[in-house]
Each structure stands twice: as structure tokens, then as C-alpha cells.
Amino acid sequence: MTGSRRGPGLLERLEAGPVICAEGYVFELERRGYLQAGPFVPEVVLDHPEQVTALHKDFVHAGSDVVEALTYYAHREKLRAVGKDGLLEDLNRQALSLAREVADDTETLLAGNICNTNIYDPADAITLQQTRAMFDEQVGWAAEAGADFVIGETFRYAGEAMSALDAIRRAGLPAVITLAVGRQPETREGWTIPDACRRLADAGADVVGLNCIRGPATMLPLLAGITNSVDVPVAALPVPYRTDPEHPTFQSLREPEAVPLPDGKPFPTALDPFTCNRYEIAVFTRSAAAAGVRYLGLCCGAGPHHVRSMAEALDRQPPASRYSEDMSKHAFFGTDPVLSSHNRAYSEQL
Ligand SMILES: [Zn+2]
């Protein structure tokens, strides 16, 4: 089935070269004023579908090869938490339909999406059954919508990632499985990251790797350990924030001089001063590719300019590259002879 509608599928594209997958829908739609921080439930899919479609188009315009349906946190547990269980199926089907339309129009891949359930507890057998049922229903809707593959993402427990992988494989679809690594470079049950990724690959994941939580600087050092441990393509989708060894995750970033923050820390609504610029994303992209990473993207906090920078670092020219900067034409800092020397002489005063 893969590739029957839109040419080459995910695995064929990965054979040919890197694949870019833009993520971070929840944070970007929160910034734009269409989604509430805290719950982070994507009701925007039903309330303002045109905004979701617009962001899908923005990310493809910037170079994403994948349109990922916005079903992150559109699962039974999260909708129950906000008292909207009744929206579950409509929200999932609508999210898939919006993504499919853009994928069809742009000849990109349609990805379904499942994620951390927040109920999974390896010591509680009931939660394992509930997790499995949640994955099965969401993967079922993705399969019915004709998804080219399904992304299972942001898992702290490798066991939960295994359950997601199992659901995707039983639906007969390719699986991209990415783990979210906290302050300790291990899964929540204590497996090393290379070991967890190897076990996921051995269990049939088509792509394994990391997404979210860590920024480029603290995700990059973990990548070679993964690429050296598995034979399948490896994924890396950091958050575009300036994490460092002392603050390896975006939740652990601190800003002592800041005005009072709602929760006493920048996460999640005051991370702006930590945002990576586009050139830092280009450096990360080249470094990750050199470490053997084939499936590249960005997670929470990413904007289209970051995605374009990633694409250009891979020597691509997405449609948005038509508008990439040309400072030679800047009125004060430019070098073009048509510019006024009167203004150029003033540039030092700016
Ligand atoms: Zn994220």
C-alpha cells in the first residue's frame, strides 16, 4: 500500500536520502492563539481547522516531506482530562482528513500520529491494556485515512514505545518510533538509549530515534550511539531551544533574571529567549546527518524558518527558499552598488 497514492513511500524516500518531518504543531498553534498551553489538547482541529491546514502548508512550503496529522494528545486519556471524551473520534478523523488533503495536494507523505499516553505504568497491568486500546483505536483511524506510515513519539518508557510499535505493525503500516529523553540519558525504566533503540528496531520499527524535550546541543551527543547500534534509519527531532549540559531539557531551562513566570520556569510559555536561531538549526542538521541520521525534523517550538534552514542545510531549495535572506540588498548593511552610500555610511550608527 505504501506509496500507492503519491509515488515513493517513506522507506523508498529514506533509501534515496534524508527525509524531513516538521513537528511542533501544538506549540506553534499555541503561540498563534488557537490552542491552550497546559492541557495542550488539539481542539483547534475542530474549532479552527483552517489554522491547522495553514500550518501544514507552511511546513511543506518550508521543506517538510511529511504532513503529520495533528492527533498528538488527541487520545482518550487527554480528552477525558478536559471533559471532552465525546470528541475523540471526530477530532482524530478530522485531523487525518486535514493532513491528507495537504499531503495529496503537495505530493508529500501522510503520517498518522500516536504519542505518550501519560497513563502507562509498567507496574500496573491495567494501564498496559488501556494503553494498548488507546493506540489501537488511533492507529485504526490513521489506517482508514490511508496514512503512509504512523509516528509513535515522545515516549519516556521504551515499553510504551514497544506497545505503540506493536499497534502500528498489526495495522500493517511502517512505524517511526521516537523516544523523549529526560535529564538522564536513559529511558524511564532505565534502559540505555542505544539498547532501547536496538530493541525497537529488532521488534520491527522502520525508523527509531529521538524527539522532543532535548535541544540540538543535548540531543546531538546521543545520536552516534544510536546510529552505531541499529541498521534501520535513525530519527532526530530536537526542540529548537538552547539546552546545555546543566539544563539538558527544555523543562529544566531556568532564567534567573526574568520577570515572574506563571510556573516559576520558562517552560512552556516563556521559552522565547532560549530559541535557537536558524543558523544553529543548520549546524545541527549537518552534524546529525554526519552522525548518520536520515530522518530529520524539529519538535515543540519550531517555526517554518527553522524547517527551511534544515532543508537548506541538506542542500534543498524548498519553495520558501525563494525568500531566504539576501543582505546584499539591505538599505544600510547591503553591498549592492545601487544602494545609497549615504545610508551605508550610517550603518555603524544602527
Ligand atoms: Zn515536542
Image (cartoon, rainbow, N blue to C red):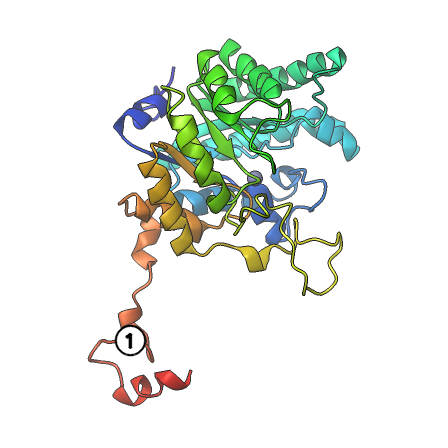
Residue 62 visible in this rendered orientation of the protein: no
For image coordinates 28% across by 24% down, the residue present is: 15
- Residue at the image point whose x is 66% and y is 46% from the top: 35
Quarter of the image containing the N terminus?
Answer: top left
Location of mark 1 (residue): 334
Is residue 113 in view from this perspective?
yes
User: Residue furthest toward the left?
Assistant: 337
Q: In which quarter of the image is residue 324?
A: bottom left
Callout 1: SS: loop
Q: Left or right: 250 with respect to 1?
A: right
Residue 37 lies, with reference to residue 174, above or below; the image says: below
Q: In this view, does 283 lie to the left or right of 257?
A: left
**Image coordinates for residue 88, horizontal then vertical, percent:** 68, 27
Question: Which residue is drawn at the image coordinates 53% and 50% (left, top)?
Answer: 241
The three-letter amino acid code for the residue at tag 1 is Gly
Residue in front for this viewpoint, 108 or 127: 127
**Residue 65's x, y, as percent?**
37, 36
Residue nearer the viewer, 193 or 329: 193
Where residue 341 sits, quadrant-wise, is bottom left
Q: Does residue 209 lie above or below 344 as drawn?
A: above
In the orientation shown, which residue stands out farthest toward the front?
Answer: 246
Q: Which quadrant of the rendered structure holds the C terminus?
A: bottom left
Q: Position of residue 57 (x, y in %)?
A: 44, 44
Quarter occupied by residue 167: top right
